[in-house]
Amino acid sequence: MAAHKGRRLRKGAATTAAAALAVAALSASQAPGATGAPDTLQTSAGQSSPVPETSADGNATGNSPYYTDLPPLNSPVPSPSSTIGTPVSRGDGEAGIPATVLDAYQKAEAELRASKPGCNLPWQLLAAIGKVESGQAGGGRVTADGTTISPIIGPQLDGNGFALIKDTDHGVYDGNSSYDQAIGPMQFIPSTWAWAGRDGNGDGKADPNNVYDAALAAGHYLCRDGWDLSTERDLHRAILSYNNSTDYLNLVLSWVDYYRKGTHSVADGTGGVPAHRSDDGLPRTSMPTTPGTHSPKPSTPGKPSKPGKPAKPSPDPGTPGSPSPEPTPPTGTPTPSDTVDHLVSPDLDGTELTATAGDAFERRIGARAVTKDGTSVAKIRVRFTISGDTDATFTGGERVATIATDAKGIALAPQLLAGEKAGSFTVASTVVGHAVKGVGYTATVTPRPADKLVRTSDTALTCTPGGEFAGQVQVKATYKGAPAAKVGATATLIKSAANPTANIVGPYFKDANGQPVRTLTGLTTDANGVVTLPKLYADLFSGTYLLRVTTPGGGSVTVELKVSVSASASASPSPSPSASS
């Protein structure tokens, strides 16, 4: 959560109840795509908690505190603007978003529209989360490149009124080497930022304290797992994965609706900062008390929380990918993560995985957490990381996934997708927040195959010495009788049918600089399995020459090329340098 500016906040039970009623009223009038309430489970106290949703990569904020201020009941009314873009809204100051922060949200939306068009991410969702998490970066207190003027750091997640998440970044981001803390304008915990972080402002680094980086990371986080945010179910799942609380979901949806009805930019540093937080009534010793405080003060471990505190958000401990917060253990008792001695493979130890480009790997990889005596350890987080020069990913397009172990101590990674680039890669598994020996896998992506190639035309290919062939060679690839799309092909002007090495005379292609080349790689068939080669040219030597096109999987076709002074000239090569030498 954002650093607080020193004043004591007030939020009693009556305020909480009123806020809940107001949120419910606002949620009933959401704009299309953000309507309705999520599926919920009723607790014995009458409060609702989210129905568990499967999440492949943990929780963005670790369920850290957030601002609970509601949008004004009177929504902004857009007025005509002479410029194209966000409607200008006159009225409540809450509708104004600091210029740099607004620009970051809209740039993130544009990038996601191009990279993950099926997600349909609206920038208003990023603005709503940014409002709830940090008050739009503390009212827009950012530099020109989008970096917050002072760090925005949440309370340490030490189990003392919050989730228990031990340090995962050695204090690099949050200044705390004992416990994790949410960081930056979008309040990522370090273990989530480690895989979700993005470079949104093009400076070559991913900084959680930069609003461009954080907004783009939040966009990718919300768009994972193939979610379509134009649908109510996926929108709710995405928001709940950010902070697993029904109150949080309804609050974010109310701000989405508010910003959809109109907003405008205000000068950086002049935005309003919310006044109420979900942790009002809890000790604040773990929070920076003034802007510019870099290192949070640790709270006293084991100190009881004050009576009357609001109910903690309750992530489902059995949901794969949830942060699995643990209750504060008695002094001297190790956490479940501390008891893990190493990870082992559930069933694939030493087995190499293989898939064809564009396909999914049939086998799921996983890791089992065990103690020294081989006992399985449940409810600890295992991070799987893909490394290597391929474009393989997990389902949802990410290369890192964090999964909670089940009752048998097993965490199964999301399904691996091969991508289009052939090659080998590895997947390593580690315990989040605890350095132990992991388990790794090697996987290979093989090229798409074609077992047959044929020319699409039987027209003879002829040319005069020093000229240009009139037609282009076009071939069709098939695999087991079906068109083979996206198959790589190689074309070579060979010396002879028995000698497939590249010739040094005769017809040639041209490279980007117009220089002769007699071997082309990187050719790819289209959706119909067809590939058309570039134009061919002849040097000054007459004769009959051969062009061979090959594909992975055994596909091959040899095309005859004739270079002669006239169409009726002999097909035999001239006495000058042999075409088959």
Image: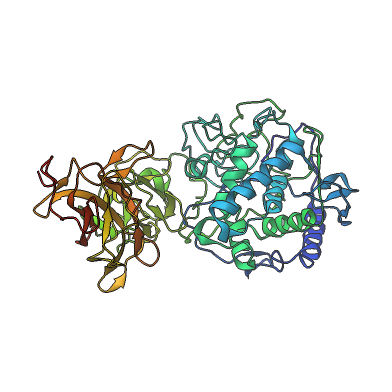
What number of labels is visible?
0
Residue 54 rendering spot, x and y as whole percentages: 50, 62
Residue 9 rendering spot, x and y as whole percentages: 79, 40
Up/down of 237 relative to 469, above or below: below
* Residue 446 seen in the current view: no
* Pick the front one: 98 or 543: 543
Q: Residue at x 28, y 41 (%)?
A: 517
Q: Residue at x 55, y 29 (%)?
A: 175
**Is 280 displayed left or right of 14 in the figure?**
left
Residue 56 rendering spot, x and y as whole percentages: 46, 56
**Is 331 displayed left or right of 92 in the figure?**
left
The quarter of the picture where residue 144 lies is top right
Q: Residue at x 21, y 61 (%)?
A: 557
- Quarter of the figure with the C terminus: top left
Residue 118 rendering spot, x and y as whole percentages: 56, 61
* Pick the front one: 577 or 167: 577
* Residue 440 seen in the current view: yes
**Is 339 displayed left or right of 73 in the figure?**
left
Q: Residue at x 81, y 60 (%)?
A: 22
The quarter of the picture where residue 338 lies is top left
